[in-house]
Every structure is written in C-alpha cells, then in structure tokens.
Image (spheres, rainbow, N blue to C red):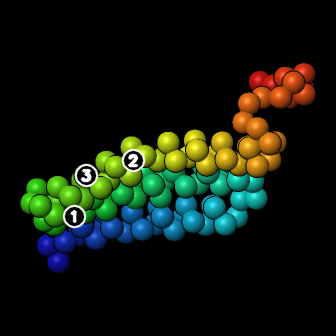
Amino acid sequence: MSATGLATAALLLLGVAATWLSCLGVLLMRDPYDRLHYTAPASALAPVLIAAAVVVTEGLSAAGIKAVLVAIVLVGTNPVLGHATARAARIREYGQWTVTDAERRQGGP
C-alpha cells in the first residue's frame, strides 16, 4: 500500500472512530445537555478528517474542494444547531428559555 493509501485509510479510520465514539456518548448520557457535548466531535472533527482523506486521495480537484466546502459548512453550523437544540430542550423543560427567579435565588458558579 502506498503512503497516500495509508494516510487516507488512517484519516478515514479516525473520522469513523470519532463518529462512533460520539454516538456511543449520546447513547450513554441521560441528560439532553450532556448528549449535546458528545455530538460535537461527530459534527466538527469527523467532517474535517474525512474531507482531509478526500483531499489526500483526490487532491484539490472538484471532489476535494467540495469535500472541504462541506466540512466548512458542517463545522460552521454545528454551534448554531447545538445552541438551538439546547434552547429547545430548556423550553421543553422549563417552559421558557430565560433564567427564572427561582434559579437566580439558587445561585450558581
């Protein structure tokens, strides 16, 4: 196997492993806020690794550029989607997304 093939295989293996570990974390966590933390590697690290594997194999051809663009979109939209999901979970739990007076009285860090 060539160096390019080994690099591609390693990058794909790392991308798939990050996704599998993220899925495992989502399955094992009970709280929706904890689950959100485990979605980050699958939506930020894995696309970058897989796009890098495509670029190593294809170079900066049309396929390589498209892979990089898809990775940029996924990495860029992950924080927005995570925030929207956390806000929806909070609204479902408390009926509103703002901090309540009871929570203020309890204090925090």
**Left of 74 or right of it: where is 20?**
right
Vertical placement of 58 versus 31: above or below? below
Q: As rendered, which of 93 and 68 lies closer to the eye?
A: 93
Q: Give the labeled residue for mark 1.
A: 54
Residue drawn at (77%, 24%), measured in percent from left and top?
Answer: 109
Give the residue number, with chain letter if any, for mark 3.
Answer: 69
Left or right of 75: which side holds 19?
A: right
Looking at the image, which residue sits at the far front?
95
The first of marks 2 and 3 along the sequence is 3
| Residue 7 showing in the rendered view | no
What residue sits 36% from the left and 57% below the top? 47
Of discs 2 and 1, which sits in the foreground?
Answer: 2
Vertical order, 74 against 10 (above or below):
above
Of the residues under marks 2 and 1, which one precedes in the sequence? Answer: 1
Q: Name the secondary structure under disc 3.
A: helix
Q: Dot 2 surroundings within 10 Å: few (below 14), some, or many (20 or more)?
A: many
Residue at 42% across, 68% down: 16
State the CA–CA distance, disc 1 to disc 3. 12 Å
Q: Amino acid at mark 1?
A: Val
* Residue 60 occupies quadrant: bottom left
Q: Which mark is residue 75?
A: 2
Q: Nearer the viewer, residue 88 or 10?
A: 88
* Position in image of residue 31 (x %, y %): 75, 53
Q: Secondary structure at mark 1?
A: helix
User: Label 2 to label 3, Cα distance in Å?
Assistant: 10 Å
